[in-house]
């Protein structure tokens, strides 16, 4: 794993957006994997700026998001669909037919998972996947204990994950109990992975990822050690507990 240490959130966002922009310019038909949460918001803002200035086009880009809450309609302000439209897709020139998120309101969730996998493979798999990390080491919504061999599936969210994400909802009761998430094997099939980590709340998870030798399903992000092209972009606050 290649580790890029940066000063703060702003610098992390700049580095991530520059890296993605270069990839998008280089590839013929780029397939980009995207994440939600607070961490990538700055990166999205930078990419919007590049697009609006005419420095970067998304016309040939296809995107796949990692996950979506079960039971939330697209119009729900807490759905990841709404987040992606609001924070990114509505402000850039990507054709809307090229953007994909799992549908958490589908009647048949198992079929939705299978269909999502097929869309990813039909697109030729993800060229660059952007990831964040949960405090418990989850990637996308793959909670501790998820098999490394998992494909896109429905997951029961950990209470700690629901609590961490409760800040976006009116009350804890409103936080969904399940999500559809790309599986760990699905994520590992991406040709390249960029993991963004910012802030002291992630310091324990980052230290565990970098310093522990364990590669275990109890700590999902540890699977990334097995991938040959992973770049971690972490700020000083997130690096605080890393000794090396
Ligand atoms: N499913 C998302 C993850 O993809 C994200 O990485 C994580 C961290 O979010 P944040 O960036 O807000 O800390 O939160 C959610 O659980």
Image (tube, rainbow, N blue to C red):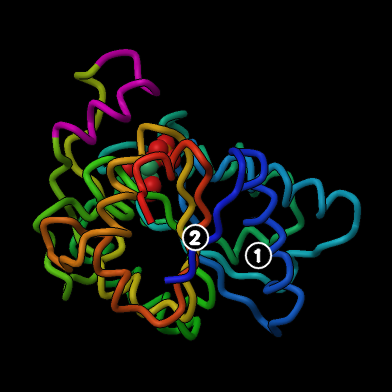
The mark that comes first in sequence, 1 or 2, is 1
Q: Which residue is mark 2?
A: 130
Q: Nearer the viewer, residue 9 or 122?
A: 9
Q: Secondary structure at mark 1?
A: helix
Q: Which residue is mark 1?
A: 20
Q: Is residue 152 above or below residue 89?
A: below
Q: Which residues are magenta?
A: 159-171
Q: Is residue 101 left or right of residue 236?
A: left
Residue 195 visible in the current orientation:
yes
Q: Nearer the viewer, residue 17 or 165?
A: 17
Q: Which quadrant of the picture is home to ligand 1? A: top left
Q: Is residue 106 above or below residue 24?
A: above
Could you tell me which residue is drawn at 80 percent across and 64 percent down? Answer: 57
- Near mark 1 (Cα within 10 A), the count class, few <14, some 14-19 or many ≥20, is many
At which x and y percent is residue 226? 29, 78
Q: Is residue 79 left or right of residue 16?
A: left
């Amino acid at each position: 794993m290649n580790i890029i240490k940066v000063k703060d959130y702003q610098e992390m966002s700049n580095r991530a957006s520059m890296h993605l922009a270069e990839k998008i310019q280089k590839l013929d038909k780029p397939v980009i994997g995207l994440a939600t949460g607070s961490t990538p918001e700055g990166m999205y803002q930078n990419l919007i700026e590049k697009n609006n200035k005419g420095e970067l086009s998304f016309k040939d880009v296809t995107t796949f998001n990692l996950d979506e809450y079960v039971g939330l309609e697209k119009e729900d302000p807490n759905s990841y669909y709404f987040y992606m439209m609001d924070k990114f897709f509505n402000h850039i020139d990507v054709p809307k037919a090229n953007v994909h998120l799992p549908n958490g309101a589908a009647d048949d969730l198992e079929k939705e998972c299978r269909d999502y996998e097929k869309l990813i493979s039909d697109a030729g798999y993800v060229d660059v996947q952007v990831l964040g990390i949960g405090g418990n080491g989850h990637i996308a919504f793959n909670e501790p204990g998820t098999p490394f061999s998992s494909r896109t599936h429905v997951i029961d969210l950990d209470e700690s994950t629901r609590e961490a994400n409760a800040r976006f909802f009116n009350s804890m009761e409103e936080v969904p109990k399940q999500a559809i998430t790309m599986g760990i094997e699905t994520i590992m099939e991406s040709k390249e992975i960029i993991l963004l980590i910012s802030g002291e709340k992630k310091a324990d998870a980052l230290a565990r990822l970098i310093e522990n030798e364990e590669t275990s399903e109890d700590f999902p992000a540890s699977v990334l050690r097995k991938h040959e092209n992973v770049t971690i972009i972490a700020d000083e606050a997130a690096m605080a507990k890393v000794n090396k």
